[in-house]
Image: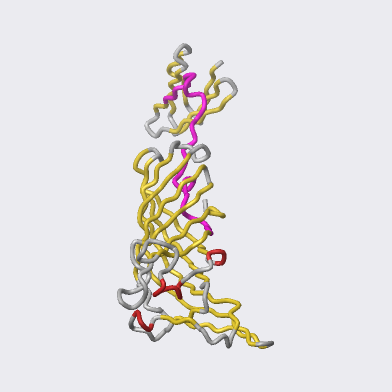
Amino acid sequence: DISAEATTAASITKIDEQAKKVVGKSGKDSTIYTWKGKRIIIIDKDGNDTINIGTKHKHFRHRYSNEEFRHWAGFSMGVNGYVGSNGSITMQKATNYMDLDYGRSFNFQLNFVERHLNLYKHKVKLVTGFGLDYHSYAFNRKTNLNPNSDSLGSFASIDTTNFYTYTKNKFRTTYIQVPLLVEFNTSNNPNKTFHIAFGVIGQYLISSRTKQGLEQGDFEFTKQRKDSYNLNPFSAKAHVNLGYRGFTVFGEYNLTPMFQSGKGPELHAFSAGVRLIPFN
């Protein structure tokens, strides 16, 4: 059975049971229809209300928002390092002071904001946002970076005195970052989609420092030094991420060298990891 009621003076002008189409007319802004135990409220300022209740439209489809497709925003963690001019993570002899302990070199990213420009039904979109990118490089040698260096020859040295035992020797950098990515989703339902995105992320250096833990007999102390260490203040990195639903893994490679030309070794940073906490 199909019945209808209105806020005040209202009437059903047409009921087509075969097409399951109801047309109502109301002197006010709203009319309430009841059909097979379901109540539907129609609001029309023109006074003419129409609703189709065909079998293909029994269920209203949820319209997903861009916020439900966030695959970049969140807290991510991974490993980081760099490759030399020879394209290898193993440093050449002239720059072996930059050798890393990859078991203690980590990347952390905290991406606060993600915004989308939807190009096609959530399946194709542009992605941008804002976040922080933190790198911790653990030196594998007793490396000392020179904060006053203005050339590659005086950039760093290795402590060969054996006067101190190095319990920690890290080089840390922090950047703000803004991505420009193209994202593809296999479904317009965020709970069923595989996703992949790629593009470029621009960065600006906001902090860099070295931190060393030193021991001499029973004496222990920590030494920290803030300096730019001739790092490039602006950089760009290639980015790709992929995953299913809210799970995302990523990989990144810096297109610009870490250090200014002629003032540090020619290195290109990279990182790879997983998003642990999504911000949806």
Q: Nearer the viewer, residue 202 or 252?
A: 252
Residue 206 left/right relative to 220:
left
Residue 279 belongs to the span the image colors magenta: no
Note whether 256 is above or below 10 in the view shown.
below
Q: Nearer the viewer, residue 38 or 272?
A: 272
Q: Residue at x 54, y 87 (%)?
A: 161
Q: Residue at x 43, y 45 (%)?
A: 196
Residue extending furthest right?
218
Note whether 25 is above or below 170 in the view shown.
above
Can you give x and y, in whole percent of width and height, for residue 202 in the image? 36, 62
Residue extending furthest front?
93
Can you give x and y, in whole percent of width and height, for residue 73 in the image? 48, 55
Residue 65 belongs to the span the image colors magenta: yes
Which corner quadrant holds the N terminus?
top right
Q: Nearer the viewer, residue 184 or 145?
A: 145
Q: Quadrant of residue 87?
A: bottom left
Note whether 210 is above or below 25 in the view shown.
below
Q: Nearer the viewer, residue 82 or 112?
A: 82
Residue extending furthest left?
261
Colour mapping used in the image: secondary structure
Q: How many marks?
A: 0
Q: Residue at x 35, y 66 (%)?
A: 85
Can you give x and y, in whole percent of width and height, for residue 112 in the image? 48, 60
Q: Quadrant of residue 28?
A: top left
Range of residues picked out in magenta: 50-77
Can you give x and y, in whole percent of width and height, for residue 115 in the image? 41, 53
